[in-house]
Image (spheres, grey):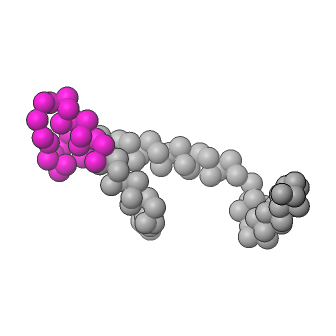
């Protein structure tokens, strides 16, 4: 059985924003306040999250393993710092 993916705090704030936005949008369309737990809002939020997750996985799969290493990150930051013009 696959282990569930962990959700980090940044993702939680993004999910909360998506939920607020979709609740507002549906309320505007319907002409009255909408409960954020209604099935239309929940379905749309889930759809958006699945689309984002799929896109993030595609983007992540296109990153080379070397780019994910800490040492590569540190060396890249150092080389970029050296290339910046002095202020």
Quadrant for the C terminus, please: bottom right
Residue 78, horizontal then vertical, whole percent? 83, 65
Q: Residue furthest front?
A: 87
Question: In this image, 82 relative to 21: left or right?
Answer: right
Q: Residue at x 43, y 66 (%)?
A: 9
Q: Residue at x 29, y 48 (%)?
A: 19
Q: Residue at x 46, y 61 (%)?
A: 10
Quadrant for the N terminus, please: bottom left
Residue 6, horizontal then vertical, whole percent? 44, 67
Q: Nearer the viewer, residue 3 or 13?
A: 13
Q: Is residue 47 above or below residue 78?
A: above
Is 70 part of what is drawn in magenta?
A: no
Residue 47, horizontal then vertical, whole percent? 35, 41
Q: Nearer the viewer, residue 14 or 54?
A: 14
Q: Looking at the image, can residue 72 be seen?
A: no
Q: Which contiguous range is marked in magenta? A: 20-43
Q: Can you tell which quarter of the image residue 73 is in?
A: bottom right
- Prevalent SS, magenta region: helix
Is 39 part of what is drawn in magenta?
A: yes
Q: Nearer the viewer, residue 7 or 23?
A: 23
Q: Residue at x 19, y 49 (%)?
A: 36
Q: Nearer the viewer, residue 5 or 82?
A: 82
Q: Looking at the image, can residue 84 be seen?
A: yes
Question: In this image, 75 relative to 45: left or right?
Answer: right
Question: In this image, 8 relative to 15: left or right?
Answer: right
Q: Can you tell which quarter of the image residue 84 is in?
A: bottom right
């Amino acid at each position: 059985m696959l282990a569930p993916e962990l959700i980090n705090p940044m993702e939680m704030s993004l999910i909360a924003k998506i939920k607020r936005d979709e609740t507002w949008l549906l309320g505007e369309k319907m002409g009255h306040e909408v409960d954020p737990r209604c099935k239309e809002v929940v379905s749309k939020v889930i759809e958006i999250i699945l689309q984002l997750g799929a896109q993030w996985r595609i983007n992540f799969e296109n990153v080379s393993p070397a780019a994910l290493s800490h040492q590569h990150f540190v060396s890249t930051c150092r080389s970029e710092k050296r290339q910046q013009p002095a202020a």
